[in-house]
Image (cartoon, rainbow, N blue to C red):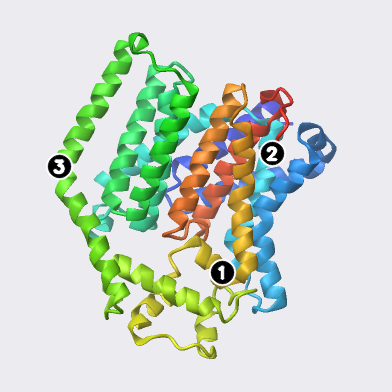
Amino acid sequence: MINKTTFNQFLVILLIGSILAYLSIRGITNIGIICLGICGIFLLFKNDAKISTKINQKYLILIFIGFSSIFLSTLAAQIFKNPLQASSFDGPLRILLGFFIFTLFLQVQNNLLRALTLTIPTSLIILFISLTFFDHHFIANWGGRYASYFVDPNTLGGQTSILSILCLYLFLIDKYRNQLVRLILLTGFIVGFSMMFHAQSRGGWLAFTMLLLLTLFFVFKQTKVDIRSISKVDLSFFALLTIYFAYFIYDNYTDSLSRLAQITNEIVLWKDGGENLENTSVGARLGIWEVSFLLIQESLLFGFGERNLTNEIKIISIEIPTYLAGPMAILLGTGPHSDMLAKLLANGVIGLLAYFCTVGIPFYFFTQSQVSKNIDVMIASRLGILYLAGVFICGLFNETLSLKYLCSFYALIVAALLAIALHPNNSTNHELK
């Protein structure tokens, strides 16, 4: 018989392994979420009565809706309109498993926040080493933009922007008063920022900027900065950051301006109905969005299904302008490059509402819990707010809740942070408003 302590440690090891290789080894995060999900289902049905003592039933129902809404919207769309397609449930099912992982960690929580504090920056360091020393040929295939053998530059830029910000927040609040931990967090932030920049995802750049402002707001709200209390170690860390960013700006200033200057020209090309929009990044994306809005009008309530759009286009009545032929081809090949449009096209309005429930419900719990006097609850809640805000911002320009490994990671992180924020041992019975 395996004792409880050993089982708890096994679960934390599974979580750590799933995060460490998230963007480095294909399939690891998917395996982790399936294993944790199975454990969660088993314990939930075994200890069903105990769950009600750990969390308000209304909250539990709301959280279930948050994790299951995309799965249920996909099911509803296929029942009422779209052809049955099992593969379209793959991503939503992984998010649904997040609910069972949440109930699992709610019962057996064991230093989850410490595990996340060390694992997130380490995963970025591992990814940086992999891309810098082993994956040069994959970077070359994307014209110098950072990408791995299964993660494209836009996804890599978005995810590293979010994770690097989480490292920065944990570094600045300095919960553990351990300089080695802070060094790991600072290194994770620096390499994450570097990968985010070199992936050249402008959506990732925007997400990083917005999340940085939110992070600074949290930090200054939480701590009162006294210049006289700053230690020599803090000054050393600050000096390291200053030197790094001074060199970084010097080395990349021209490239940054050039990349940003392209935006205006490409928007003008799209606005004027120019040809060959598919050859420009912003122009192609705007063209894809325009096509998406035209198509959505044909099936607003239930969409077209995830894999049925090509067949549906042949019979729709709406005419697509010729200058949008290129963006249309990209849309059919790689999707609409937007989470909200992806859900609208796949499952219609109910899919969009499901997306808002998926992101919005845990966001609500985090915003309510982040005022807690319990330091673990506050930190986990603010990490959750930063993560979900990053997912939403990146999702405006790329599909962050469509690919399987992204859905798996989302479920893992949100489930773990919610379990910390709502765990009865971390709470003084605080009520959500």
* Residue 173 image offset from top left, x and y in percent: 45, 23
Q: Indicate the amino acid at tag 3.
A: Asp
Q: Which of marks 2 and 1 is in front?
A: 1
Q: Nearer the viewer, mark 2 or mark 3?
A: 3
Mark 3 lies on a secondary structure that is: helix
User: Which residue does the image show at 28% across and 42% down from the upper left?
Assistant: 194
C-beta proximity under 8 Å, tags 1 and 3: no
- Per the image, the residue denoted by label 1 is 344
Question: Is residue 22 visible from the viewing direction of this image?
Answer: yes
User: Which residue does the image show at 19% across and 52% down from the upper left?
Assistant: 257
- Per the image, the residue denoted by label 3 is 251
Q: Is residue 39 left or right of residue 299?
A: right
* Residue 139 image offset from top left, x and y in percent: 26, 55
* Residue 378 image offset from top left, x and y in percent: 57, 28
Q: Nearer the viewer, mark 1 or mark 3?
A: 1
Q: In this view, does 161 lie above or below 355?
A: above
Q: Indicate the amino acid at tag 1.
A: Leu
Q: Is residue 311 above or below residue 117?
A: below
Closer to the camera in the image, 123 or 323: 323
User: Which residue does the image show at 62% across and 27% down from the upper left?
Assistant: 110
